[in-house]
C-alpha cells in the first residue's frame, strides 16, 4: 500500500493512504488541488497542486474529481460593482415583505436599453 506524506497546517507532516485523499482538477483552466481530512486533528485540509503533483497522486491511486467553473462567471455583468453601502441597502430591503418586487424593479431600471 502506498503511503503519502502531506502537511496539515496545524499538525505538520501526516501519513495518508491514497484512499484518504482526493485530487480535484478544474476542466476549464486545468488548475489542480488535493484535499484530505487530517488523521490527527480531523480538520479538512486543501492544497493547490501542480500538474506534476496531480499526475503523481493519481498514479498512486488517489481518486480524481473533475469540476467546472460556475456558469455565472461567464455571464455578462451590467452596472457598477457592489459597494458596502449597496450591501447594507440590500439588507435593509430584505426587511420588507415586497423586497423581491422592489429589487426586480431596480434591476429593470438599471439594465441597458
Image (tube, rainbow, N blue to C red):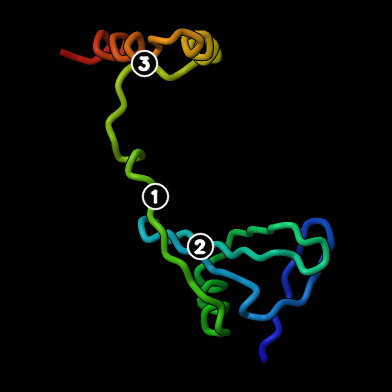
Q: CA distance from mark 1 to mark 3?
A: 28 Å
Marks 1 and 2, the one that precedes in the sequence? 2
Q: Quadrant of residue 38?
A: bottom right
Residue that mark 3 sits on: 100
Would you say the residues marked 1 and 2 are in contact, meaning their CB atoms lie under 8 Å apart?
no
**Label 1 vs label 3, nearer the camera:** 3
Mark 2 lies on a secondary structure that is strand
Assign the N terminus to one quadrant of the image: bottom right
Dot in front, 3 or 2: 3
Q: Quadrant of residue 43?
A: bottom right
Q: What is the total number of numbered labels drawn onto the structure image?
A: 3
Q: Which mark is residue 21?
A: none
Name the residue carrying label 2: 32
Quadrant that contains the C terminus = top left
Q: Report which residue position mark 1 lands on.
A: 69
In the picture provided, is 14 more to the left or to the right than 23?
A: right
How would you rate the neighbour count of disc 2 (Cα within 10 Å): few for under 14, some for 14-19, many for 20 or more? Answer: many
Q: Position of residue 73 (x, y in %)?
A: 36, 39
Q: Earlier in the sequence, mark 3 or mark 2?
A: 2
Q: Residue furthest front?
A: 97
Amino acid at each position: 500500500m502506498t503511503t503519502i506524506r502531506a502537511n496539515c497546517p496545524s499538525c505538520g507532516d501526516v501519513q495518508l493512504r491514497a484512499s484518504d485523499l482526493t485530487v480535484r482538477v478544474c476542466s476549464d483552466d486545468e488548475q489542480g488541488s488535493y484535499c484530505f481530512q487530517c488523521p490527527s486533528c480531523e480538520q479538512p485540509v486543501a492544497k493547490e497542486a501542480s500538474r506534476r503533483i496531480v499526475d503523481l497522486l493519481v498514479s498512486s491511486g488517489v481518486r480524481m474529481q473533475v469540476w467546472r467553473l460556475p456558469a455565472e462567471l461567464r455571464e455578462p455583468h451590467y452596472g457598477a460593482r457592489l459597494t458596502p453601502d449597496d450591501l447594507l441597502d440590500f439588507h435593509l430591503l430584505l426587511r420588507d415583505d415586497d423586497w423581491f418586487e422592489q429589487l426586480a424593479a431596480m434591476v429593470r431600471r438599471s439594465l441597458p436599453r
